[in-house]
Image: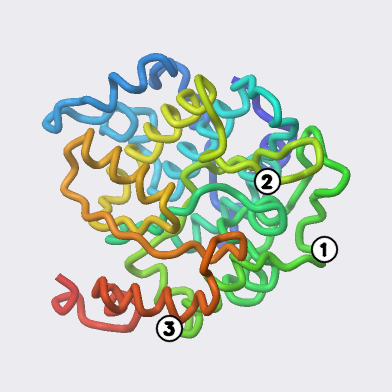
């Protein structure tokens, strides 16, 4: 399968910086899963698996077996990105941005730093925004939050085809993503440090690829129709299923109704003992979204999830 120039350069840089603790020692051969993953047409059938059977994507006989959790997750996310890129999207989709490809250095550092253990809670967002993950490679990746709170850095390149009004300038971007600023500021106020947020939880996008029309307007997966929507959902569903098993997730918080519904569908179909919750999306495009932080905090409190974001003994969290 195609390996981008950015991935090759990152691999080369990584081999020469093995002593840098902020770099993920990746084996990029893990990203090619063509021999172990099903064709897209088989995905729906694969979701109806026997719960006693091992999942091909994460079992001990898979090519991932010798890698750690961060490596496994990056391999899953990268393969998902490459498979989405193979979809021939119909208009109005004109641009496809794959930040896990062109910002793979930053995303790998994110996983290495914050996702090297299993997680009780998965916050599930929808897809990258133009001034967040599309710039930094991090979900809800508002520049200030990524640099000054999450303390992440790395090489950021360009998408293969760039929309003139949505140029990728990485950490030099002067725009601030409102959704990301709201999300990370909320948890900064609750947790104090990123480690307290990531101790029991993680955040990922259901679809890690940004889709835009000719004018640069973001097209969410929920806006797609017909066979392309099914094709996208099939491969995103299968990857989410693998991530849930890899991280041994117990609770999913869908950020917005679309993410909540996809999580419900996958958990029900696969018969997983995972609880599904919903919290409002921080996007200013969402209706009745004034005072989002207050509403989100109230939701987390009502769901009895706030206890996971303060320092507590493990026995108090079961």
Q: Which of marks 2 and 1 is nearer the N terminus?
A: 1
Q: Where is residue 182 in the image (x, y as percent from the top left)?
A: 57, 73
Q: In which quarter of the image is the N terminus?
A: top right
Rendered residue at 76%/62% (across/down): 171
Q: Mark 2 packing: few (<14 Cα in 10 Å), some, or many (20+)?
A: some
**Which is more N-terminal, label 3 or label 1?**
1
Q: Mark 1 points at which residue?
A: 172
Give the CA distance from mark 2 to mark 1.
Answer: 21 Å
Instruction: Tell me the quarter of the picture where residue 146 sits.
Output: bottom right
Question: Badges 1 and 3: C-beta atoms under 8 Å apart?
Answer: no
- Residue 24: % across, % down: 55, 51
Where is mark 3, residue-wise? 190
Q: Residue furthest right?
A: 164
Which residue is label 2 attached to?
218
Q: Where is residue 284 in the image (x, y as percent from the top left)?
A: 61, 65
Horizontal side of residue 150 vs 43, given as left or right: right
Q: Position of residue 180 (x, y in %)?
A: 59, 66
Label 2 vs label 3, nearer the camera: 2
Q: Distance between the residues labelled 2 and 3?
A: 30 Å
> Total number of numbered labels?
3
Reply above or below: 206 against 129.
Answer: above
């Amino acid at each position: 399968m195609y390996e981008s120039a950015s991935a090759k350069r990152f691999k080369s840089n990584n081999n020469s910086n093995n002593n840098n603790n902020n770099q993920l020692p990746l084996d990029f051969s893990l990203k090619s899963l063509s021999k172990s993953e099903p064709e897209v047409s088989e995905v729906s059938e694969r979701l109806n698996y026997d719960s006693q059977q091992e999942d091909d994507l994460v079992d001990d006989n898979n090519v991932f077996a010798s890698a750690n959790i961060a490596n496994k997750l990056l391999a899953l996310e990268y393969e998902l990105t490459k498979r989405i890129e193979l979809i021939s999207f119909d208009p109005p989709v004109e641009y496809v941005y794959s930040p896990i490809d062109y910002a793979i250095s930053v995303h790998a550092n994110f996983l290495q730093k914050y996702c090297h253990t299993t997680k009780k809670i998965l916050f599930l967002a929808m897809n990258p925004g133009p001034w967040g993950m599309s710039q930094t490679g991090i979900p809800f990746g508002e520049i200030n939050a990524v640099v000054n709170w999450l303390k992440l850095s790395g090489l950021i390149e360009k998408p293969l085809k760039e929309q003139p009004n949505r140029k990728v300038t990485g950490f030099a971007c002067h725009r601030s993503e409102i959704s990301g600023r709201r999300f990370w500021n909320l948890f900064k106020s609750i947790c104090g440090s990123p480690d307290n947020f990531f101790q029991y939880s993680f955040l990922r996008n259901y679809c890690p690829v940004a889709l835009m029309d000719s004018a640069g307007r973001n097209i969410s997966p929920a806006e797609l129709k017909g066979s392309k929507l099914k094709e996208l959902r099939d491969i995103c569903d299968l990857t989410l299923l693998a991530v849930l098993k890899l991280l041994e997730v117990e609770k999913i918080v869908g950020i917005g109704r679309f993410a909540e519904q996809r999580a419900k569908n996958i958990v029900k179909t696969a018969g997983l003992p995972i609880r599904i919750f919903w919290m409002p999306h921080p996007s200013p495009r969402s209706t009745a979204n004034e005072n989002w932080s207050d509403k989100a905090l109230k939701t987390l409190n009502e769901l009895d999830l706030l206890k996971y974001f303060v320092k507590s003994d493990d026995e108090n969290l079961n």
